Each structure stands twice: as structure tokens, then as C-alpha cells.
Amino acid sequence: MRRIEYDLGLFRNEAERGYSEAVFRLLLSVLANADLLYLRTHYPIPSIYSGVVRYEREPLGQEKWKGISACIRDGFADCEDLACWRTAELAHKGIRARPAFWRRVHRTTRGKINVYHVVVLYPDGRIEDPSRRLGMGRE
């Protein structure tokens, strides 16, 4: 089995945003922990900043969440993939960071849409943005 797909009905409307964001946090934690397990069982893996992967945005409204091996295979990843990989790297070194996100509301001709960006949050409150370090904003 190479692919598992969830259809959770998230982010359908503003009334369900709280539930959707709670599930989003849970899924980020799952991906980060899967990446940590991958690091523990496939070590050594090149560092996220070693040049094996770059940031690449997915088309708006499409989400394919990738683990470390898929990121390396493809040579690119987007924010949740990169933040979870980096979180796993830090956990592998004993640093208890976690993936976190923020939301921006964008107005379009069709109305408002929520756009989320995933980063790494350190225990002391510092934020690391692997996407920026790997090319976001230079597209």
C-alpha cells in the first residue's frame, strides 16, 4: 500500500473552522511523528537544508501531504511537508518543537478564502520557517 487518502470534510465553511483547525493540528502531528519514525529507521537521511529539496507551492485548493522519502524523491515540497520534516529532525536531536500554523484571509472575486501556512514552533516560542529558507517568496 503506497497511498492512504482521508476525506474528512474539513474547511467546508466558517462555522466548522474550529473543528477543522483542530483536526489540521492533529494531522500535522501525525505527519511529524511519521517523519520522526522514518528518520529513526532510515538514518542517516540528508538534512532538510542539505540541498536535496526545495519549496514549491501546490495549486490553491489542492493538498498532497508528503513524508520525507516522497519529498526527497520529488525534490520539492510545500510548507506542511517541510515543517513536519524539520520538526522530526529536531525531535531526533531531542528538541521538542512542533508544527504550527497561521491563517490569512484572502479576498478573491469569489469571496474570502482562508490560506494556512505551516512553520516550526520551538518550546521557547521561536518560529522557524523551512519554506522561506528553501525558496518560498522567490517563486
Image: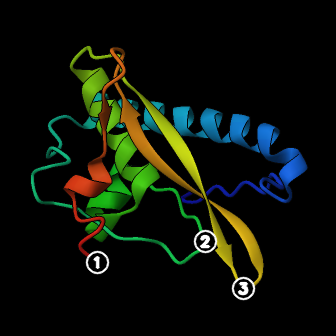
The CA distance from mark 3 to mark 1 is 23 Å
Q: Is residue 73 left or right of residue 26?
A: left
Observer-side mark, 1 or 2, equals 1
The residue carrying mark 2 is 62
Residue at position x 28%, y 48% from top? 130
The CA distance from mark 1 to mark 2 is 18 Å
Q: Mark 1 is on which residue type?
A: Glu
Q: Position of residue 114 (x, y in %)?
A: 66, 60
Observer-side mark, 2 or 3, equals 3
Q: Mark 3 is on which residue type?
A: Thr
Extreme residue in the bottom direction: 109
Give the position of the N terminus as an image quadrant: bottom right
Q: Secondary structure at mark 1?
A: loop
Sequence-wise first label, 1 or 2: 2
Extreme residue in the left direction: 50
Q: Secondary structure at mark 3?
A: loop
Q: Which mark is residue 109?
A: 3
Question: Could you say which is closer to the camera, residue 121 or residue 91?
Answer: 121
Q: Callout 3: few (<14), some (14-19), or many (20+) C-alpha neighbours within 10 Å?
A: few
Sequence-wise first label, 3 or 1: 3
Q: Position of residue 22 (x, y in %)?
A: 71, 34
The residue carrying mark 1 is 139
Residue at position x 61%, y 35% from top? 25
Q: Quadrant of residue 84?
A: top left
Q: Mark 2 is on which residue type?
A: Gln
Observer-side mark, 3 or 1, equals 3
Residue at position x 35%, y 32% from top? 87
**123 vs 15: above or below:** above
Q: Is residue 49 left or right of residue 56?
A: left
